[in-house]
Amino acid sequence: MTLDSTLAKALVAQVNAELAASHSYLAMAFFFDAQDLPGFASFFRAQSAEESQHATRLSDFLLRREAEVALTAIPAPETTFASPSAAIRAALTMEQGVTQSIHALYGLAREKSDYAAQTQLMWFIDEQVEEEDSFRTLLTQTEAAETDRWNLITLDKEIATQAASAASA
């Protein structure tokens, strides 16, 4: 079954948004590397890879539905932040925007009675609940820790351990 052209265009836009998010997370990883916080950097590298996987998941779906996937230019991401928590706040805001976009896509798929797209997008809806929760928790922890460099370094080591556990799972 061929995908509705309006829905296909919106899904392609989401593919490009996922790639832009990947790019932003990589820039955040570089920021944390420069702050000598390798645990945070590793976390954001993993987030970058995950966003790229999301783009691939959507593009594979589009291609299976005989839609063309056209990539667009990726805008330069923000590379400097006032603090670690400012970077994480920016990431949370970005994820909240993705959630809104996914919800709009689901609504469009529902309007078009495209059950396959709805099923695909439900996975993304569930993923966004997890992403927003993860970033809210990380923001709370970072805001509490960053007033004392030792606490921030301790949190960084904890994040590195969590990232290593997630990578081996």
Image: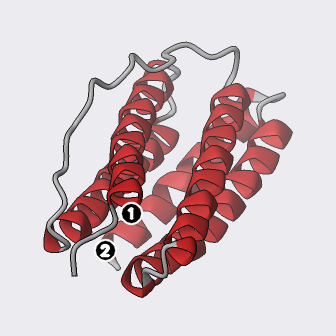
Out of 9 and 17, give the one closest to the viewer.
9
Amino acid at pointer 2: Ser
Please give left or right for residue 146 compared with residue 132 in the image.
right
Number of marks in the rendered image: 2
The residues tagged by marks 2 and 1 sit, at their Cα atoms, a distance apart of 6 Å
User: Quadrant of the rendered structure where residue 145 is?
Assistant: top right
**Vertical side of 134 occupied by 141: above or below:** above
Identify the secondary structure beneath mark 2: helix
Identify the secondary structure beneath mark 1: helix
Numbered tag placed on residue 42 in the rendering: none
Amino acid at pointer 1: Ala
Q: Quadrant of the C terminus?
A: bottom left
Task: Mark 2 and mark 1 in contact? Answer it, CB < 8 Å.
Answer: yes
- Residue 57, how many percent across, how many down? 28, 66
Please give left or right for residue 84 compared with residue 69 in the image.
right
Q: Residues within 10 Å of mark 1 (few under 14, many from 20)?
A: some
State the residue position of label 1. Answer: 164
- Residue 123, how many percent across, how many down? 48, 78
**Vertical side of 114 occupied by 166: above or below:** above
State the residue position of label 2. Answer: 168
- Residue 147, how many percent across, how many down? 84, 28
Out of 113 and 72, give the one closest to the viewer.
113
Please give left or right for residue 101 compared with residue 53 in the image.
right
Identify which residue is drawn at 37% across, 84% down.
116
User: Quadrant of the rendered structure where residue 151 is?
Assistant: top right
User: Quadrant of the rendered structure where residue 1 is?
Assistant: bottom left
